[in-house]
Amino acid sequence: MITLALSKGRIFEETLPLIQAAGIEVSEDPERSRKLILGTNMPDVRVVLVRATDVPTYVAQGGADLGVCGLDTLIEHQAESASDDLFQPIDLDIAKCRMSVAVPADFDYAQAVRRGARLKVATKYTHMARAFFATKGMHVDLIKLYGSMELAPLIGLADAIVDLVSTGNTLKANRLVEVEHIMDISARLVVNPASLKLKCARLQPLLDAMAAKAGAIA
Ligand code: AMP
Protein backbone atom coordinates (compact mmCIF):
# COMPACT_ATOMS: atom_id res chain seq x y z
CA MET A 1 0.00 0.00 0.00
CA ILE A 2 1.21 3.51 -0.88
CA THR A 3 -0.11 6.29 1.38
CA LEU A 4 0.04 9.93 0.27
CA ALA A 5 -0.53 12.64 2.91
CA LEU A 6 -2.17 15.85 1.70
CA SER A 7 -3.89 18.81 3.33
CA LYS A 8 -7.27 20.03 2.12
CA GLY A 9 -7.52 23.13 -0.04
CA ARG A 10 -4.87 24.50 -2.36
CA ILE A 11 -2.32 21.71 -1.80
CA PHE A 12 -4.92 18.99 -2.47
CA GLU A 13 -6.32 20.73 -5.55
CA GLU A 14 -2.94 21.53 -7.08
CA THR A 15 -1.52 18.05 -6.34
CA LEU A 16 -4.42 16.30 -8.14
CA PRO A 17 -3.10 16.95 -11.69
CA LEU A 18 0.33 15.71 -10.60
CA ILE A 19 -0.94 12.35 -9.38
CA GLN A 20 -3.30 12.12 -12.35
CA ALA A 21 -0.16 12.23 -14.49
CA ALA A 22 0.78 8.96 -12.77
CA GLY A 23 -2.67 7.55 -13.59
CA ILE A 24 -4.09 8.04 -10.08
CA GLU A 25 -7.65 9.34 -9.63
CA VAL A 26 -8.88 10.09 -6.11
CA SER A 27 -12.32 8.57 -5.64
CA GLU A 28 -13.87 11.28 -3.45
CA ASP A 29 -13.94 15.07 -3.16
CA PRO A 30 -12.63 16.00 0.32
CA GLU A 31 -14.80 19.13 0.33
CA ARG A 32 -17.93 16.93 0.17
CA SER A 33 -16.84 14.08 2.38
CA ARG A 34 -15.78 13.87 6.02
CA LYS A 35 -13.59 10.86 5.37
CA LEU A 36 -9.93 11.20 6.25
CA ILE A 37 -8.79 8.26 4.16
CA LEU A 38 -9.68 8.50 0.48
CA GLY A 39 -9.37 5.60 -1.94
CA THR A 40 -8.17 5.90 -5.51
CA ASN A 41 -8.68 4.00 -8.76
CA MET A 42 -5.56 2.04 -7.80
CA PRO A 43 -6.27 -0.49 -5.04
CA ASP A 44 -2.78 -0.06 -3.54
CA VAL A 45 -2.79 3.76 -3.40
CA ARG A 46 -4.67 5.87 -0.85
CA VAL A 47 -4.69 9.53 0.22
CA VAL A 48 -4.85 10.60 3.86
CA LEU A 49 -6.03 14.11 4.75
CA VAL A 50 -4.06 15.78 7.52
CA ARG A 51 -3.35 19.31 8.69
CA ALA A 52 -0.70 21.01 6.56
CA THR A 53 1.65 21.29 9.54
CA ASP A 54 1.29 17.56 10.25
CA VAL A 55 2.32 16.37 6.75
CA PRO A 56 6.10 16.23 7.54
CA THR A 57 5.40 14.35 10.80
CA TYR A 58 3.20 11.73 9.10
CA VAL A 59 5.82 11.16 6.42
CA ALA A 60 8.87 11.18 8.71
CA GLN A 61 7.21 8.78 11.17
CA GLY A 62 6.03 6.40 8.44
CA GLY A 63 2.30 7.13 8.79
CA ALA A 64 2.48 8.04 5.11
CA ASP A 65 5.03 7.11 2.45
CA LEU A 66 4.96 10.52 0.85
CA GLY A 67 3.30 13.88 1.26
CA VAL A 68 3.03 17.39 -0.10
CA CYS A 69 3.54 20.49 2.03
CA GLY A 70 4.71 24.08 1.69
CA LEU A 71 8.40 24.94 2.07
CA ASP A 72 7.33 27.16 5.00
CA THR A 73 5.85 24.14 6.81
CA LEU A 74 8.94 22.08 6.07
CA ILE A 75 11.39 24.70 7.35
CA GLU A 76 9.44 25.19 10.59
CA HIS A 77 9.10 21.41 11.05
CA GLN A 78 12.82 20.79 10.48
CA ALA A 79 13.73 23.52 12.99
CA GLU A 80 11.55 21.85 15.62
CA SER A 81 12.14 18.17 14.82
CA ALA A 82 15.71 18.11 13.55
CA SER A 83 15.95 14.33 14.06
CA ASP A 84 13.08 13.63 11.65
CA ASP A 85 14.43 12.12 8.49
CA LEU A 86 12.79 13.03 5.19
CA PHE A 87 13.99 12.26 1.69
CA GLN A 88 15.32 15.33 -0.12
CA PRO A 89 12.14 17.20 -1.01
CA ILE A 90 11.23 17.75 -4.65
CA ASP A 91 10.04 21.24 -5.60
CA LEU A 92 6.61 20.75 -7.21
CA ASP A 93 6.30 24.42 -8.14
CA ILE A 94 2.66 24.52 -6.96
CA ALA A 95 0.88 26.51 -4.20
CA LYS A 96 3.32 29.33 -4.89
CA CYS A 97 3.43 32.37 -2.64
CA ARG A 98 6.03 34.35 -0.69
CA MET A 99 6.99 34.84 2.94
CA SER A 100 6.96 38.55 3.74
CA VAL A 101 7.13 41.11 6.49
CA ALA A 102 4.13 43.47 6.53
CA VAL A 103 3.29 46.51 8.64
CA PRO A 104 0.36 48.95 8.88
CA ALA A 105 0.38 51.38 5.94
CA ASP A 106 1.12 54.32 8.28
CA PHE A 107 4.06 52.64 10.08
CA ASP A 108 7.50 53.92 9.00
CA TYR A 109 9.33 50.59 8.90
CA ALA A 110 12.47 51.95 7.20
CA GLN A 111 12.89 54.54 9.93
CA ALA A 112 12.30 51.94 12.67
CA VAL A 113 15.05 49.80 11.11
CA ARG A 114 17.42 52.81 10.87
CA ARG A 115 16.78 53.73 14.50
CA GLY A 116 17.45 50.14 15.56
CA ALA A 117 13.99 49.95 17.14
CA ARG A 118 13.06 46.65 18.79
CA LEU A 119 9.99 45.52 16.87
CA LYS A 120 7.21 43.27 18.08
CA VAL A 121 6.54 40.75 15.31
CA ALA A 122 3.54 38.41 15.26
CA THR A 123 3.87 35.20 13.26
CA LYS A 124 3.14 31.52 12.96
CA TYR A 125 6.60 31.10 11.37
CA THR A 126 8.84 31.91 14.33
CA HIS A 127 11.93 30.04 13.09
CA MET A 128 11.91 31.69 9.67
CA ALA A 129 11.20 35.09 11.21
CA ARG A 130 13.98 34.73 13.79
CA ALA A 131 16.49 33.68 11.13
CA PHE A 132 15.50 36.53 8.81
CA PHE A 133 15.75 39.32 11.39
CA ALA A 134 19.01 37.83 12.73
CA THR A 135 20.59 38.12 9.28
CA LYS A 136 19.49 41.78 9.22
CA GLY A 137 21.02 42.27 12.67
CA MET A 138 17.63 43.39 14.03
CA HIS A 139 16.39 42.64 17.52
CA VAL A 140 12.73 41.58 17.51
CA ASP A 141 10.29 40.21 20.05
CA LEU A 142 8.38 37.38 18.39
CA ILE A 143 4.76 36.71 19.28
CA LYS A 144 3.64 33.24 18.21
CA LEU A 145 0.14 33.12 16.71
CA TYR A 146 -1.63 30.28 14.91
CA GLY A 147 -3.76 32.32 12.49
CA SER A 148 -5.22 35.71 11.57
CA MET A 149 -1.78 37.32 11.91
CA GLU A 150 -3.08 40.37 10.04
CA LEU A 151 -5.15 41.30 13.06
CA ALA A 152 -2.18 41.69 15.43
CA PRO A 153 -0.85 45.09 14.20
CA LEU A 154 -4.38 46.45 13.82
CA ILE A 155 -5.12 46.11 17.51
CA GLY A 156 -1.66 46.99 18.80
CA LEU A 157 -0.50 43.49 19.65
CA ALA A 158 2.48 43.78 17.27
CA ASP A 159 4.28 46.31 15.04
CA ALA A 160 4.71 43.88 12.16
CA ILE A 161 3.78 40.41 10.94
CA VAL A 162 5.60 37.68 9.05
CA ASP A 163 3.13 35.76 6.90
CA LEU A 164 2.52 34.14 3.53
CA VAL A 165 1.33 36.47 0.79
CA SER A 166 -0.21 35.26 -2.44
CA THR A 167 -2.36 37.88 -4.20
CA GLY A 168 -1.79 40.54 -1.51
CA ASN A 169 -5.57 40.98 -1.12
CA THR A 170 -5.62 40.00 2.56
CA LEU A 171 -2.94 42.59 3.40
CA LYS A 172 -4.74 45.26 1.37
CA ALA A 173 -8.09 44.54 3.03
CA ASN A 174 -6.45 45.11 6.40
CA ARG A 175 -4.45 48.22 5.38
CA LEU A 176 -1.11 46.44 5.68
CA VAL A 177 1.82 46.79 3.27
CA GLU A 178 4.68 44.42 2.46
CA VAL A 179 8.04 45.85 3.48
CA GLU A 180 10.35 42.81 3.18
CA HIS A 181 10.35 39.78 0.91
CA ILE A 182 11.84 36.95 2.96
CA MET A 183 11.65 34.12 0.41
CA ASP A 184 9.62 32.53 -2.35
CA ILE A 185 7.58 29.54 -1.20
CA SER A 186 6.21 26.56 -3.12
CA ALA A 187 5.01 23.08 -2.23
CA ARG A 188 7.49 20.22 -1.82
CA LEU A 189 7.09 16.48 -2.21
CA VAL A 190 8.57 14.73 0.81
CA VAL A 191 9.22 11.00 1.01
CA ASN A 192 9.88 8.61 3.87
CA PRO A 193 13.43 7.25 3.31
CA ALA A 194 12.55 3.71 4.41
CA SER A 195 9.53 3.66 2.05
CA LEU A 196 11.74 4.79 -0.79
CA LYS A 197 14.03 1.83 -0.19
CA LEU A 198 11.39 -0.82 0.52
CA LYS A 199 8.77 0.29 -2.02
CA CYS A 200 11.12 1.73 -4.64
CA ALA A 201 9.62 -0.19 -7.58
CA ARG A 202 6.16 1.22 -6.83
CA LEU A 203 7.19 4.68 -5.59
CA GLN A 204 9.86 5.72 -8.08
CA PRO A 205 7.57 5.83 -11.17
CA LEU A 206 5.05 7.85 -9.12
CA LEU A 207 7.74 10.34 -8.02
CA ASP A 208 9.06 10.59 -11.57
CA ALA A 209 5.59 11.20 -13.04
CA MET A 210 4.79 13.87 -10.44
CA ALA A 211 8.15 15.62 -10.91
CA ALA A 212 7.83 15.52 -14.71
CA LYS A 213 4.28 16.91 -14.62
CA ALA A 214 5.35 19.61 -12.12
CA GLY A 215 8.17 20.60 -14.47
CA ALA A 216 5.75 20.68 -17.39
CA ILE A 217 3.30 22.93 -15.48
CA ALA A 218 6.12 25.27 -14.39
P1 AMP B 1 -3.60 36.57 -0.29
O1 AMP B 1 -4.73 37.42 0.22
O2 AMP B 1 -3.93 35.89 -1.61
O3 AMP B 1 -2.29 37.33 -0.35
O4 AMP B 1 -3.39 35.35 0.74
C1 AMP B 1 -2.94 35.63 2.02
C2 AMP B 1 -3.57 34.72 3.04
O5 AMP B 1 -3.61 33.37 2.59
C3 AMP B 1 -2.75 34.74 4.31
O6 AMP B 1 -3.63 34.59 5.42
C4 AMP B 1 -1.83 33.56 4.14
O7 AMP B 1 -1.46 33.01 5.39
C5 AMP B 1 -2.64 32.60 3.29
N1 AMP B 1 -1.84 31.96 2.24
C6 AMP B 1 -1.47 32.49 1.06
N2 AMP B 1 -0.79 31.62 0.31
C7 AMP B 1 -0.73 30.48 1.02
C8 AMP B 1 -0.16 29.18 0.80
N3 AMP B 1 0.50 28.88 -0.34
N4 AMP B 1 -0.27 28.26 1.78
C9 AMP B 1 -0.94 28.55 2.92
N5 AMP B 1 -1.50 29.74 3.19
C10 AMP B 1 -1.40 30.70 2.27
Image (cartoon, rainbow, N blue to C red):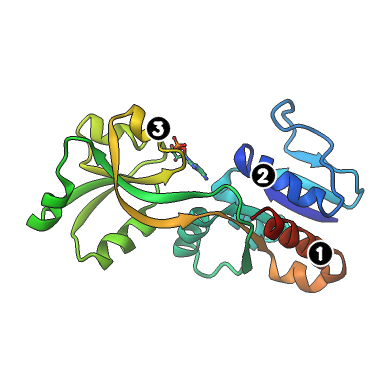
Q: Which residue is drawn at 68% across and 40% down?
A: 13
Per the image, the residue denoted by label 3 is 170
Per the image, the residue denoted by label 2 is 14
Q: Quadrant of the N terminus?
A: bottom right
Q: Which of marks 1 and 2 is nearer the N terminus?
A: 2
Q: Does the residue labelled 3 lie within 8 Å of ligand 1?
A: yes
Dot 2 alpha-carbon crowd within 10 angstroms: few under 14, some 14 to 19, many 20 or more:
some
- Asked which secondary structure carries label 1, the reply is helix
In the rendered view, does 34 fall on the left or right side of 71?
right
Query: Where is residue 2 shown, x and y percent of the image?
Result: 82, 56
Asked whether the beta carbons under mark 3 and mark 2 sit within 8 Å of each other, the answer is no
Query: How many marks can you see?
Result: 3
Q: Does the residue labelled 2 lie within 8 Å of ligand 1?
A: no
Q: Earlier in the sequence, mark 1 or mark 3?
A: 3
Measured Cα–Cα span from mark 1 to mark 2: 20 Å
Per the image, the residue denoted by label 1 is 203
Q: Residue at x 32, y 29 (%)?
A: 174
What amino acid type should be assigned to the residue bearing mark 2?
Glu
Query: Where is residue 76 shown, x and y percent of the image?
Result: 46, 57
Dot 3 alpha-carbon crowd within 10 angstroms: few under 14, some 14 to 19, many 20 or more:
few
